[in-house]
Image (tube, rainbow, N blue to C red):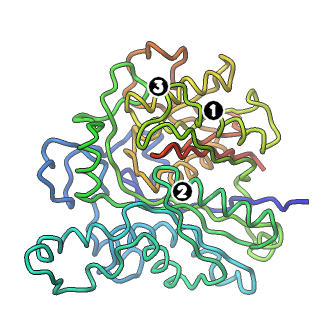
């Protein structure tokens, strides 16, 4: 019989808060920080709004207790992991602990700073700027700092990266291969990312409006989100209390296009259907959907149609919290796993900010007002990435 993976703690940093409580407070009050960047220096800074964390690299390093020369993605990861893992780090002795961390940008924020020098001279005067460029280096820096050695891996599957890291962590706990897993991901803003998405012409010049008929695109964000998973043995040793379980998960691919979902959301539908089946429940048992909901024309349409198909017209409460945090790319599945855990623990559904007009090709609308005092038994969290990499997670009340 498979062991249950319980979520016992969370760690997060986004544009709306530096920890779980601050992010929750912002979600409840309708606060967002989408606007002109402070730390990201770009040609587009006055034209393209982003959801930036208003802390310098030094401030992030001080919060995490690490070297400020780390790439910003690693700094964000360390801040969130510290919140999630620190309460158990000293008392988890002898327990097999794994670290599953996702990102897509790696150390690009530092690498792009030396690009001009390298292009002109063929050399890099400060090698430390590029030594942690690859995505795996981000994970290794954080794992080494927190002395996590039993199992360490990096997942980079575009916008479904963190969801897949949580999925893999849950599978390894269920299989008895680990007692504890810290799972999620991080991504920082960079010129490379901003210019890439701008080239695709899917960035909103205003604050995004997911699932609105007049949506114009997404806002990029940065952040990190992690959950701590434990089996029963680890919970007993660490005196931990379960918030919820990772009861279902699935990854599917519609193989339609490099950057677009299939018009009918084939991969989206497969991921949701299989995740719900794995959880051993029916679609009607889902209390809330944390939508992928980026605000782009293609994404919201394909996800919306897929949801109609899965739920046969009886769509549960649903909202996109990217209207608060922006799209944090490789971190989004981890960030939204934290929000899903909060929804179950506190009986809340967060609003889909700035929704105004019903979509013409989707027959349901997201929740637009904060809902409190609700029994949330099962949350479906969607993360659909480039290349058709579609992942869904189900979180269930313990």
Read off the residue under disc 1: 269
- Residue 388, position as x, y percentages in the image: 51, 42
Read off the residue under disc 2: 162
Q: Secondary structure at mark 3?
A: helix
On screen, residue 172 versus residue 363, left or right, reads right
Which one is nearer the viewer's eye here, 28 or 122?
122
Q: Nearer the viewer, mark 2 or mark 3?
A: 3
Which one is nearer the viewer's eye here, 299 or 264?
264
Q: CA distance from mark 1 to mark 2?
A: 19 Å
Read off the residue under disc 3: 301
In the displayed structure, 279 sits above or below 237; it is above
* Mark sitting earlier along the chain (2/3): 2
* Mark sitting earlier along the chain (1/2): 2
Location of residue 253 (image quadrant) = top right
In the displayed structure, 115 sits above or below 313; it is below
For image coordinates 84% across by 62% down, the residue present is 3
Q: Judge the density around disc 2: few (<14), some (14-19), many (≥20) Cα neighbours within 10 Å.
A: many
Q: CA distance from mark 2 to mark 3?
A: 23 Å
| Badge 1 vs badge 2, beta-carbon distance below 8 Å | no
| Badge 1 vs badge 3, beta-carbon distance below 8 Å | no
For image coordinates 53% across by 79% down, the residue present is 143
On screen, residue 50 versus residue 397, left or right, reads left
Location of residue 216 (image quadrant) = top left
- Residue 359, position as x, y percentages in the image: 44, 17
């Amino acid at each position: 019989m498979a062991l249950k993976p319980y979520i016992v703690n969370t760690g997060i940093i986004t544009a709306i808060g530096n920890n779980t409580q601050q992010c929750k407070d912002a979600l409840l009050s309708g606060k967002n920080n989408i606007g002109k960047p402070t730390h990201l220096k770009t040609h587009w800074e006055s034209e393209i709004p982003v959801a930036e964390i208003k802390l310098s690299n030094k401030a992030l390093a001080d919060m995490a207790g690490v070297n400020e020369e780390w790439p910003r993605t690693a700094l964000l990861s360390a801040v969130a992991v510290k919140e999630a893992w620190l309460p158990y780090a000293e008392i988890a002795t002898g327990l097999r602990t794994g670290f599953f961390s996702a990102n897509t940008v790696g150390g690009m924020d530092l690498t792009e700073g030396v690009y001009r020098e390298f292009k002109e001279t063929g050399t890099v005067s400060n090698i430390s700027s590029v030594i942690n460029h690859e995505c795996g280096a981000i994970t290794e820096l954080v794992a080494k700092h927190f002395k996590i050695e039993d199992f360490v891996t990096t997942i980079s599957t575009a916008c479904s990266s963190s969801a897949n890291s949580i999925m893999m962590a849950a599978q390894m706990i269920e299989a008895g291969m680990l007692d504890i897993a810290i799972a999620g991901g991080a991504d920082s803003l960079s010129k490379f990312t901003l210019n890439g998405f701008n080239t695709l012409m899917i960035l909103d010049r205003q604050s995004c409006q997911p699932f609105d008929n007049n949506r114009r695109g997404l806002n990029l964000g940065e952040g990190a989100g992690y959950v701590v998973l434990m089996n029963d043995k680890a919970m007993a040793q660490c005196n931990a209390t379960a918030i919820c379980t990772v009861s279902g998960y699935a990854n599917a691919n519609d193989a339609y296009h490099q950057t677009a979902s299939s018009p009918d959301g084939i991969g989206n539908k497969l991921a949701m259907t299989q995740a719900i089946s794995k959880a051993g429940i029916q679609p009607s048992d889902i209390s809330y959907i944390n939508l992928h909901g980026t605000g782009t024309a293609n994404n919201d349409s394909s996800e919306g149609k897929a949801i109609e198909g899965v739920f046969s017209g009886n769509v549960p409460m649903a909202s996109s919290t990217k209207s608060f945090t922006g799209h944090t790319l490789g971190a989004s599945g981890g960030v939204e796993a934290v929000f899903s855990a909060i929804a179950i623990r506190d009986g809340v559904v967060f609003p889909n900010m700035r929704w105004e007009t019903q979509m013409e090709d989707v027959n349901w609308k997201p929740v637009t007002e904060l809902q409190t005092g609700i029994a949330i038994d099962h949350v479906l969290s969607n993360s659909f990435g480039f290349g058709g990499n579609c992942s869904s997670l189900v979180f269930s009340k313990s």
